[in-house]
Amino acid sequence: MAYWLFKTEPQAFSIEDLALRPEQTEPWDGIRNYQARNLLRDQVQTGDQLFIYHSSCPEPGIAGIARVVRGAYPDHTQFDPESPYYDPKSSEENPRWLMVDVQLADVFAEIVSLKQIKANPALEEMMLVRKGNRLSIQPVTPEHGQILLAMAKRR
């Protein structure tokens, strides 16, 4: 099992939205960065644990955890001209974009804020806090994963 950080803007799709989905499961669609797509394709596996990170909000941070319940497969939104994620250069025969299905594991009682993460010296090498790293899907080392879990206040 590997650890990942998946970013989402809570006004678009939050951990609370995931909690309301049937079986608390949802496709993680809309990835339109080749490096993030390649991580989904080549490294993210069924059973991996995800830290769900709320970004572009008043208090960015980790809101909870989920797990991958289905590995990478073509993102259907790339084929839909009505979707904001439509890609006219993609085809069903040659899809460019992938998604995985995620299932909620836990919603934290409090967000593990970016401020708290940055203040923890043991996390200073975490990709999230390094300058210039804006990827929406990021690997998290097992050591950093355990530290983040220890920082979380569980419900």
Image (spheres, grey):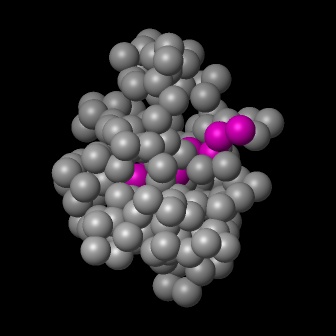
> Is 143 covered by the magenta stretch?
no
**Residue stretch in magenta:** 50-56
User: Image height check: is 105 above or below 21?
Assistant: above
Give x and y (percent) for residue 115.
Answer: 64, 23
27 left or right of 47 in image: right
Q: Nearer the viewer, residue 84 or 91?
A: 91
| Residue sitting at the far bottom | 22
User: Image height check: is 67 above or below 110?
Assistant: below
Q: Visible in this render: residue 145? A: no
Number of residue marks = 0
> Split into 4 quadrants, where in the image is the N terminus?
bottom left
**Quarter of image, res 12:** bottom right
> Is 55 covered by the magenta stretch?
yes
| Residue sitting at the far front | 89
> Split into 4 quadrants, where in the image is the C terminus?
bottom right
Q: Residue at x 67, y 49 (%)?
A: 9
26 left or right of 123 in image: right
Give x and y (percent) for residue 93.
Answer: 28, 74
User: Image height check: is 149 above or below 141?
Assistant: below
Q: Nearer the viewer, residue 114 or 89?
A: 89
Q: Visible in this render: residue 84? A: yes
Give x and y (percent) for residue 13.
Answer: 66, 61
Q: Residue at x 46, y 35 (%)?
A: 135
Q: Residue at x 54, y 45 (%)?
A: 7
> Main SS type for the magenta part?
strand
| Residue sitting at the far right | 58
Q: Residue at x 37, y 17 (%)?
A: 125
**Quarter of image, res 62:** top right
User: Image height check: is 120 above or below 152?
Assistant: above
Give x and y (percent) for residue 25.
Answer: 48, 77
